Amino acid sequence: MAALLEKSVSGTKRKKGATTVLWALGTVWVSCLMARGVKGGDSSLKCEDLRVGQYLCDSPKIDNDTQEPVNCTNHTAYVACYPAPNVTCKDFSGNDTQFTGKEIGFYRPIECRNVNGYSYKVAVALSLFLGWLGADRFYLGYPALGLLKFCTVGFCGIGSLIDFILISMQIVGPSDGSSYIIDYYGARLTRLSITNETFRKPQIYP
């Protein structure tokens, strides 16, 4: 009888110990969930991270002299973007705001070119009509080549033809490394190069 009593008492203690452990684990789990929920509630979505269709950006204002976006600095300009109505996110000041579609939520960076007064149309015209005198090379800042073309009559016409092709294809540009002034929606050419972003591994077929 005493042995049975001891077994029942020890079994009750084990149950109480297991219950205590489970209660402690449950408390820790609930605390973790609450902490995660509070943390997630504090960090709302930034307006820059909105998806396409949840905001609308202004078109860049183009400078008539440079044909590039106004306030272009370090090859970057910024345009204002407006989140859609009833969208809540953190604006550029870090404040949580529910937008109506008229408030600026963030400024999106856009790429722009560095120009320094050299016109593409003028360069092509000089190369076509006065290339044999080296006027195109003088205009673009290559006085030595311009003088050489002038003395050799454009390398007997061959050098003038080659320069006209290179300038027309925008391969030869101003000597200071700047870009041509070309209409913003004009015939601009972009040089393609292989980088870590553009490189693609060849497809391996089984």
Image: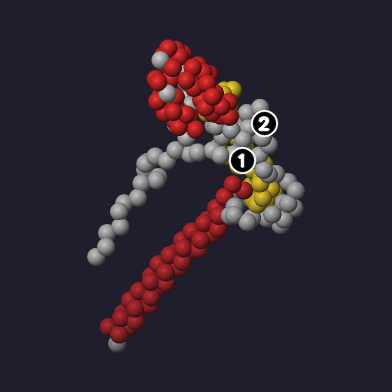
11 over 136 or under it: above or below = below
Residue located at (44% from left, 28% from top): 161
Q: Which residue is mark 2?
A: 63
Residue located at (56% from left, 39% from top): 187
| Rendering coords of residue 131 (x, y %) | 49, 22
87 over 119 or under it: above or below = below
| Rendering coords of residue 15 (x, y %) | 38, 75
Split into 4 quadrants, where in the image is the C terminus?
bottom left
Could you tell me the amino acid type at mark 1? Tyr
Q: Which mark is residue 96?
A: none
12 over 33 or under it: above or below = below
Q: Name which of mark 2 and mark 1 comes first in the sequence.
A: 2
Residue 114 located left or right of residue 20: right
Q: Which mark is residue 185?
A: 1
Direction front: furthest residue:
156
Residue 182 in view (yes/no)? yes
Residue 202 falls in which quadrant of the image?
bottom left
Residue 141 in view (yes/no)? no
| Rendering coords of residue 122 (x, y %) | 58, 25
Label 2 – label 1 distance at C-alpha:
13 Å
Residue located at (69% from left, 48% from top): 82
Residue 165 located left or right of residue 64: left
